[in-house]
Structure formats: C-alpha cells, structure tokens
C-alpha cells in the first residue's frame, strides 16, 4: 500500500523524483513524497538506507543529482538560505557549544533564526523542552546527551518553524525522555507543523507518526498510515522489506 | 547574525583556558619585547648621542692644526636610531652604527650589534616585530584551525546552517570574532607602546612618528586579517581539525621560515656582491690610475697644474695666487669621491636587486611583504641605512673640501708648518642626522605595499569563492 501523498490539499515538504548519486553509487533512487501541515512522517530504514541523505537534501546541505526537493513550495537547491526560515532541524546527536551555557546556546541559535528572547523566555523554552531549570545557566560541557537533545528541541521549538526535520532524534534518550519527546512532537503537529523524522525506532514511529515510510537501499519501498497498523505488524512489514 | 556568531566565538574562546594561557604567554612576550626593545633603543641612542657629541666637541675644540692634518684627524658620524626602530630592529643589529669620516677615504660603517654580540644573535632577537610577524600568526592558527572543522566534527555546523545563516556569513562572523580576540591580545602591547611613545617623554612626538606608528599598526592589522582569513578558509576546506592544523602549520613554516631563507639565498646567488677587500682594491686602483687606467693621479695633477698656470699666467707653483697643494687635494677628493660613489652605487644596486627578490616574493608570501614594510616604517631597513651612509659621505666630502679650500686660500704652497687657530674648527657645522620622512620610507616599499593589498583582495575574493564550495554533508 503506497501512500506517497498526504490527505491534505496543502504540501509543505515535497520530493519530486529526488535522486542522489555519490561517486557512481545511487544513495537515493527517485524519491517522490508529499507531507502536509500537521503531519508526522516517520522514515524507517537501516543504516545507509538513504534516510540522512534525504534529510540533507531537504536541508540543502547537498545538491540532488536530479529531481528536486521543495519546502513550502520553494525548491531547496535554489533557495538554500530562504527555506531555512520555515524549517527547524534536530540531528541524532545535538552538539552544542560546550563553553556556552544552555541559555546562551539557545539564545545564539534563536538569534540566528531572527528571534530575540528575554532570559525568562529562554528559560521557559528550555523548561518546556524538559531541561531542568537549574541546568539552564550551566555550561553545556557538563550536559548529558539527553540534556543536549532537549536544548536541541528547545532550539527547534523557539524557531516556530512550520517544518521540522529530525534525524533519529530519540537515539540514546532514556524511555522517559523519549516519551516526553513524543508528546512534544504531537503538540507541534497539532499546531500545524509538518514533521519528517528519520528513525530506527519502529514503536516510536507507530506512536507518533501519521504515516510511516520504509526505505531500503535508497528506495522508498513502502508507505503506510500508522493508524492502520499495530506496532508488531509494522515491525513485520519492516523486517520483510529488510529480508530479515 | 554576524554579530551573534562573532560574539559566540569571542565568548567561547575567552572561556577556553588553553587559549587564555597561550594568549597570556604571547601578550607577556609582546610586552617584554616592547620593554626590552625600548631599553636597547634608549641605551644605544644615549651611547650614540654621547659619542656624537663627544666627537663633535673634540673636533670643535681641537688644538691649532694644519688644515690637512685636521682633514685626516676627521670625525665620526654615529647613526641615531629611528624612533620606531625599538619595535622592529630590522637590519640595525647587523649594520654598522658609526662611520669614521676622514680625507681621501670613504670608510664603511662599523661596530654593529652583531659584531659586538655572541653568535646567538644569528637566531634573531625578541622584538615586537618578531612576535607580531611570527608568533601572532601561530596564535591565529591555533585559534582558527578548528573554526569549521570542529563544527563539522561535532555536528554544530549543520545546526547553525539550519538556522538560516549562509556559509559565507558564518565565515565572516567567525573572522570578525577571531579578529576581536587577536585585537584583545595585541591591544595591551600597543597601548603600552603608545604610552611609551607619546606619554613618557621618551620621544619627540611629531607628525612623522604619529604617521609611522599609525602605518605600523595598520600594516599588522592587515597581516593578521590575512592570516585569520586564510586559517578560517583552510578550516572550512578540511573535514578534520588535525588536517587543518597540519596544513596551516605547514603554511606557517613555508611563509615564515622557508620562503624568506630561500628568497634571501636566491637573491645572493643571482646578484653576487664583491668582498670588501675587492671593492677597496678596485677603488684604490682607480683612484691611483684613473677610472680607465690611462689617467693616473700624477697625470691628473700635472694637467691641473698646467691649467692653473695658463689661467693665472704664471710659470711656477710659487707664483700661483692659490696654494696648489689645496687645489690638488680638492681635485683628488672630488675624483676619489666620484670613484667611490660609482662603486658604492654599484654595490647598493646589487643589494637592492637582492632585496627586490624578497620584495617581489611578498606577492607569494604575506610575511615577506609585512617584514619589508615593517622595517621600512620603523626606519631600520636597508634604505634607511644607505640614506645615513650617503648623508655621512656628503658631510665627509664637504668637510674635506672646506679644509682643502682653507689650505688653498689661506696657506702658501708647500707650507706644512702653519697651524690654524682652534677657533677655525668651531665654524664647522657638526654632523647631525635626521631620519627621512615616512613618505620617503613608503616610496621605497611600493612593491611590498602592492603585495599586501593584493593579498588582502585575494584572500577576500578567493576566500569567498572557496567558502561557497565548502562541503557541509
């Protein structure tokens, strides 16, 4: 069952026959995809399947070999800086500036996105992302991975982006933090944010995703509505595609 | 955007204890070099002023003497150091500090610092210029080598770029931030120099010193900026901090050690200079036998004698209304000076050709452009040295000719007994030397100025293009 299009008439994230080749090897084989506002699209796949390549193409960090990626109707390759105005990104491992505090890191990234917040507002964003209040004024060099990830979430939320690109964001988070993160994604989705999340976590995909895509060797082999399946069914489909 | 990133770089660096320790070390070296340079300058300057005053007094208060005896008694010209040479010793330590000025002979400058020091001086001196030219670029390299590579390695680069800042803006923001840090390290030393120059009464403040100091600061600001941009661009082009650091250190070794040595060696091999003994022998021979070897000293004297006989309508030297001894001395002095001047100009041209290699190498190496310009602005380069030698030679020539004139007009032919009053020597103007103006200094380094500007434009234009090609993922 291939559901490449969202049900909404609006398209926020779009890929049209998107291909990427690295030194003669195809990393992405003609991806076609549409994601609408408020939708959470979870992309499952093994390491090297092409998930990060897809995200890098949507971010404009790499140029497609052919085809095009679109954010809010703008072609990414020719609007690399402009598309970032409406886009936020959380990598697998949020690395911040260790010599700056949590507040200073958030302030820096927010100001780069054009938002100037007061100290109180910055603390509030960090707290909403789940960072303990006493950690906010401390230097990030002493933060755990989970704490850094929460600052990363705060950075994304404080940007008020309409598109959120996540590259295995819950990797390494403890279950409590992962659950909090899922709640946060659902809240953002409810405000109309389109979310594209590359992940290995089948159960998290089922829990938060609107649709789940399975990618293998650069090809989107299956797209399923998350609500139609149980987690164990999704796992079966995934494993079948992986020939495991 | 740019301000925020620049502020972040500034704050992050200030909180890095390793960099703080390195900066304090460099700052202390800079301050020490300033104070040591000033002490050395003041000591040498005082010695030379006292020596100059002493020889001037000795000449003016000389006992009753025959004028030609006085011409051989001679005098000394001590080269005063240019005010800013305490920042950049340049060639001052290797060039002579005094010239013995006597009749018939054009002596070279003697008593350089290098002659009076141990062989350790060959390793270079700890001057402000040394710290600014060699150590600050190293500090810049250690500061900037990870500008982009660390962001790539940790993944913050993607996060930064996802916020909407372009690579080019990010690079310029980093350059701005690092420039502030370098300014923070260098500024205390420059403030100390300013206090020494303008507030302590050590120097007679005039427009020329102000202009030279301004140009000195400006030259090094350009130099640091060039190194910062190169370091940031190299960091952007590399994926790993280690390769970025190795590339930059290699560039530093090439720019600050290998190319300067190679260009100096190339210059001396392409344009060989005669030894002092060879040059002295040639001058002596040409003075004695004539430039073309067909017009000897005796022949010239005979021709002059016949011309004077004809001019005054007499048949013997005793009948001449002027003392032939003085006339022939003056003619000899004129001839020997001409011979010497030709050889000196030839030698100077050879040295200038050698220096030109280094000047043009500035187009390939900003260190050389700055080194030459810094010496020129500080008044310690080859051109200032030659300027002093020429002034000293002009003084020597005029003094000798004045004494020859006295002999020719006040003493009779063959009179070797008359002694002139000691008051006669007081009428001679003492030797005094003034450093030429900054404009003159700059005119001698137009190639280095052009090279520095070419570097400035090149790093901006090429840097921008290369930054745009930086791989993010």
Image (cartoon, coloured by chain):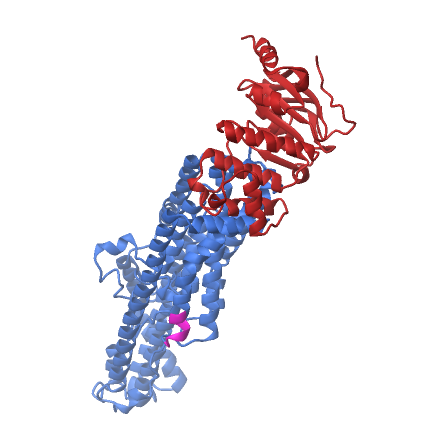
Chain colours: A red, B blue
> In this picture, is B388 found above or below B473?
below
> In this picture, is A122 found above or below A231?
below
Residue A214: x percent and y percent?
62, 17
Q: Looking at the image, how many numbered discs can be counted on the residues?
A: 0
> In this picture, is A109 found above or below A59?
below
Q: Is residue A61 visible?
A: no
Residue B297: x percent and y percent?
30, 70
| Residue at 36% across, 76% down | B395
View extreme (right): residue = A9
On the rendered image, what quadrant is the C terminus of chain B found in?
top right
Observer-nearest residue: B389 or A39? A39
Q: Which residues are magenta?
A: B195-201
Residue A85: x percent and y percent?
67, 40
Could you say which quadrant of the image residue B336 lies in? bottom left
> In this picture, is B108 found above or below A150?
below
Observer-nearest residue: B226 or B104? B226
Residue B457: x percent and y percent?
56, 50
Could you say which quadrant of the image residue B41 lies in? bottom left
Observer-nearest residue: B423 or B147? B147
Specify whether residue B282 is painted magenta.
no
Q: Is residue B257 visible?
A: yes
């Amino acid at each position: 069952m291939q559901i490449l299009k969202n049900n909404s008439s609006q398209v926020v994230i779009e890929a049209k026959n998107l291909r990427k080749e690295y030194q003669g090897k195809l990393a992405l084989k003609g991806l076609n995809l549409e994601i609408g506002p408020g939708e959470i699209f979870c992309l499952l796949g093994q390491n090297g399947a092409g998930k990060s390549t897809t995200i890098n193409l949507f971010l404009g960090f790499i140029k497609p070999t052919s085809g095009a990626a679109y954010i809010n109707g703008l072609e990414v390759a020719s609007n690399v800086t402009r598309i970032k105005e409406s886009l936020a990104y959380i990598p697998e491992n949020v690395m911040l500036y260790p010599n700056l505090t949590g507040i200073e890191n958030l302030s820096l990234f927010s100001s780069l996105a054009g938002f100037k917040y007061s100290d109180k507002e910055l603390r509030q964003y960090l707290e909403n992302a789940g960072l303990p209040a006493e950690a906010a004024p401390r230097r990030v060099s002493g933060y755990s991975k989970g704490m850094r990830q929460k600052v990363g979430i705060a950075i994304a939320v404080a940007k008020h982006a309409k598109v959120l690109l996540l590259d295995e964001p819950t990797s390494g988070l403890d279950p409590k933090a992962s659950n909090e993160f899922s709640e946060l994604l659902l809240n953002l989705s409810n405000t109309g944010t389109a979310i594209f999340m590359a992940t290995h976590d089948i159960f998290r995909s089922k829990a938060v995703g609107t649709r789940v895509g399975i990618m293998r060797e650069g090809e989107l082999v299956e797209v399923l509505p998350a609500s139609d399946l149980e987690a164990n069914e999704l796992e079966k489909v995934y494993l079948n595609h992986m020939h495991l | 955007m740019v301000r925020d990133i620049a502020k972040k770089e500034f704050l992050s660096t200030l909180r890095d204890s390793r960099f703080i320790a390195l900066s304090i070390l460099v700052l202390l070296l800079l301050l020490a070099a300033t104070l040591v340079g000033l002490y050395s300058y003041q000591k040498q300057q005082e010695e030379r002023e006292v020596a100059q005053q002493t020889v001037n007094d000795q000449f003016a208060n000389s006992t009753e003497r025959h004028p030609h005896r006085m011409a051989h008694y001679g005098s000394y010209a001590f080269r005063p150091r240019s005010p800013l040479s305490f920042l950049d010793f340049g060639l001052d330590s290797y060039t002579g500090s005094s010239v013995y000025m006597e009749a018939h002979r054009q002596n070279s400058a003697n008593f350089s610092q290098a002659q009076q020091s141990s062989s350790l001086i060959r390793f270079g001196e700890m001057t402000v210029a040394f710290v600014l030219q060699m150590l600050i670029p190293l500090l810049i390299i250690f500061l900037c080598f990870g500008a982009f590579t660390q962001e790539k390695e940790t993944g913050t680069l993607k996060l930064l770029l996802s916020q909407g800042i372009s690579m080019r803006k990010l690079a310029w923001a980093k350059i701005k931030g690092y420039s502030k840090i370098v300014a923070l390290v260098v500024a205390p030393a420059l403030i100390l120099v300013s206090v020494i120059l303008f507030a302590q009464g050590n120097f007679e403040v005039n427009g020329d010193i102000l202009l030279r100091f301004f140009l000195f600061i400006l030259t090094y600001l350009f130099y640091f900026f060039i190194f910062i941009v190169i370091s940031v661009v190299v960091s952007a082009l590399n994926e790993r901090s280690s390769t970025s650091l190795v590339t930059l250190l290699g560039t530093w070794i090439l720019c600050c050690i290998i190319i300067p040595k190679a260009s100096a060696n190339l210059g001396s091999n392409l344009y060989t200079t005669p030894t002092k003994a060879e040059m002295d022998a040639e001058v002596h021979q040409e003075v004695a036998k004539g430039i073309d070897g067909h017009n000897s000293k005796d022949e010239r004297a005979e021709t002059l004698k016949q011309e004077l006989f004809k001019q005054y309508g007499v048949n013997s030297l005793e009948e001449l209304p002027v003392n032939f001894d003085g006339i022939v001395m003056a003619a000899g002095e004129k001839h020997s000076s001409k011979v010497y001047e030709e050889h000196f100009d030839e030698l100077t041209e050879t040295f200038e050709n050698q220096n030109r290699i280094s000047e043009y190498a500035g187009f390939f190496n900003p260190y050389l452009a700055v080194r030459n310009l810094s010496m020129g602005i500080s008044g310690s380069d080859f051109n200032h040295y030659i300027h002093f030698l020429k002034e000293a030679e002009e003084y020597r020539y005029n003094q000798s000719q004045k004494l020859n004139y006295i002999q020719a007009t006040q003493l009779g032919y063959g009179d070797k007994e008359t002694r002139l009053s000691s008051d006669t020597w007081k009428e001679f103007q003492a030797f005094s030397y003034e450093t030429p103006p900054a404009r003159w200094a700059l005119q001698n380094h137009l190639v280095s100025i052009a090279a520095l500007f070419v570097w400035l434009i090149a790093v901006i234009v090429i840097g921008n293009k290369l930054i745009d090609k930086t791989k993010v993922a």
